[in-house]
Image (cartoon, rainbow, N blue to C red):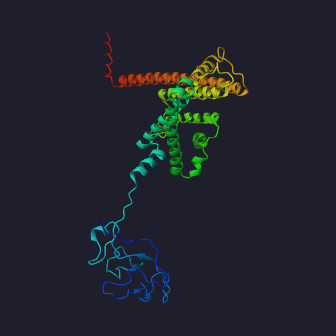
């Protein structure tokens, strides 16, 4: 489909003086002769001032034949098209008879590219939600693979399947990292961010293991990706932080508070258990035989302050135990804050209902018909 493009109203790039201008000959083959709008002196396309009167020459391009025209011209001297038609009416008039038509170029973005761009840069879009779910599924699958790989019987029977699954996950995480770098502007904003560094460290051990480098203990770095499960809450955070009609931020809901608490607790347990397994697995194989058993130790540390838990023997293991203990205290403080916030919501709701009932009673008292005052008794 082709359509005539309306004449440009701003100055455009023109050929240098002495060069042949596009569309420099009319339909009759005669060379194009432009004249100054003040003194009718011939001018060369591209000149900024008239050589006779010195008046300024502002150039534009004819919308039909792309020939240069000066600012004060009413008709194109090449094709005869009117240059005074408003832009909104130019499409209905069209070019002069015999004038060449210019094709309308419409740039259409590749649908796959557009979906990926929206899925990584527009949190309010549906592709972003789907992309978040895909990444979350990869994270959970990676955690399951690492946990099962720590069990000797499962590793002996399904070691090939776990290795193939690890390769697929490595490819998926690598593609996700590359796409994040591509679509983030500026790119260093993502590369140097916390999540960017965590993503990079999550894929490095996989490539190093492919080079036959003995970095099995660095597989713990991949569990940093479990922190990205917090991205699921980005949608809820964006929704609750949107201002209301008065410009005030909306309050957080109880469901969002409990989601944050549950995700944080699971992340603390998985990270601490896996770190302690790689730190104490070889030194104390009876106490920490695999990651699921170490998860039970992490739950004991968090819930009972380590009273009934087995204490690690290595320095790294003890540091992990102390960090897990402090994380458990932080979880308890978060739980208290959530309960206090919920009690505050209930109190505010009670006050609101009481105030609404009082206003309704006052309104009913005002609208209720008043009884006439009794007539005074006649004097005897």
Give the residue drawn at x 61%, y 33%: 220
- Seen in the image, is 1 located left or right of residue 120? left
User: In the picture shown, does residue 375 fall above or below 106?
Assistant: above
Q: Residue reaching furthest top?
A: 380
Quadrant into which the N terminus falls: bottom left
Q: Is residue 26 above or below residue 111?
A: below
Q: Position of residue 233 (x, y in %)?
A: 50, 34
Residue 329: x and y in percent read 64, 23
> Which residue occupies 45% across, 45% down?
119
Residue 279 visible at all: yes
Find residue 379 and report its horizontal and vertical position in percent: 32, 12
Relative to 362, is 77 above or below? below
Q: Is 224 on the left or on the right of 108, as rendered?
A: right
Taking depth in this image into account, of 205 and 52 the one nearest to the observer is 205
**Res. 261 in view:** no
Viewer-proximal residue, 94 or 365? 94
Residue 153, position as x, y percentages in the image: 54, 23
């Amino acid at each position: 489909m082709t359509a005539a493009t309306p004449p440009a109203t701003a100055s455009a790039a023109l050929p240098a003086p002495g060069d042949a201008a596009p569309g420099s000959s009319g339909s009759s083959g005669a060379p194009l002769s432009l004249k100054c709008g003040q003194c009718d002196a011939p001018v060369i396309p591209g000149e900024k001032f008239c050589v006779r009167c010195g008046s300024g020459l502002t150039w534009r391009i004819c919308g039909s034949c792309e020939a240069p025209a000066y600012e004060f011209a009413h008709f194109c001297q090449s094709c005869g098209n009117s240059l005074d038609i408003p832009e909104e009416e130019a499409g209905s008039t069209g070019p002069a008879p015999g004038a060449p038509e210019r094709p309308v170029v419409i740039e259409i973005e590749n649908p796959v590219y557009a979906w990926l761009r929206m899925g990584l840069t527009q949190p309010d879009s549906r592709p972003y939600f789907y992309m978040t779910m895909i990444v979350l599924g990869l994270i959970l699958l990676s955690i399951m693979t690492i946990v099962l790989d720590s069990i000797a019987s499962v590793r002996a029977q399904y070691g090939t399947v776990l290795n193939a699954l690890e390769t697929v996950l490595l490819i998926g995480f690598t593609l996700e990292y590359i796409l994040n770098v591509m679509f983030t502007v500026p790119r260093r904003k993502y590369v140097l961010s916390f999540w960017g560094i965590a993503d990079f460290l999550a894929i490095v051990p996989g490539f190093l293991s492919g080079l036959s480098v003995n970095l099995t203990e660095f597989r713990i770095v991949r569990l940093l990706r479990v922190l990205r499960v917090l991205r699921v809450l980005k949608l809820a955070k964006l929704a609750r932080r949107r201002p209301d009609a008065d410009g005030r931020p909306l309050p957080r809901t109880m469901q969002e508070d409990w989601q944050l608490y549950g995700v944080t607790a699971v992340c603390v347990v998985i990270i601490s258990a896996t770190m302690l397994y790689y730190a104490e697995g070889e030194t104390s194989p009876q106490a920490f035989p695999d990651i699921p058993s170490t998860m039970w130790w992490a739950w004991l540390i968090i819930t009972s302050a380590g009273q009934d838990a087995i204490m690690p023997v290595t320095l790294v293991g003890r540091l992990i135990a102390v960090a897990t203990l402090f994380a458990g205290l932080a979880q308890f403080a978060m739980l208290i804050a959530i309960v206090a916030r919920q009690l505050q919501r209930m109190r505010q709701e009670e006050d609101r209902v009481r105030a609404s009932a009082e206003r309704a009673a006052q309104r009913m008292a005002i609208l209720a018909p008043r009884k006439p005052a009794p007539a005074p008794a006649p004097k005897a």
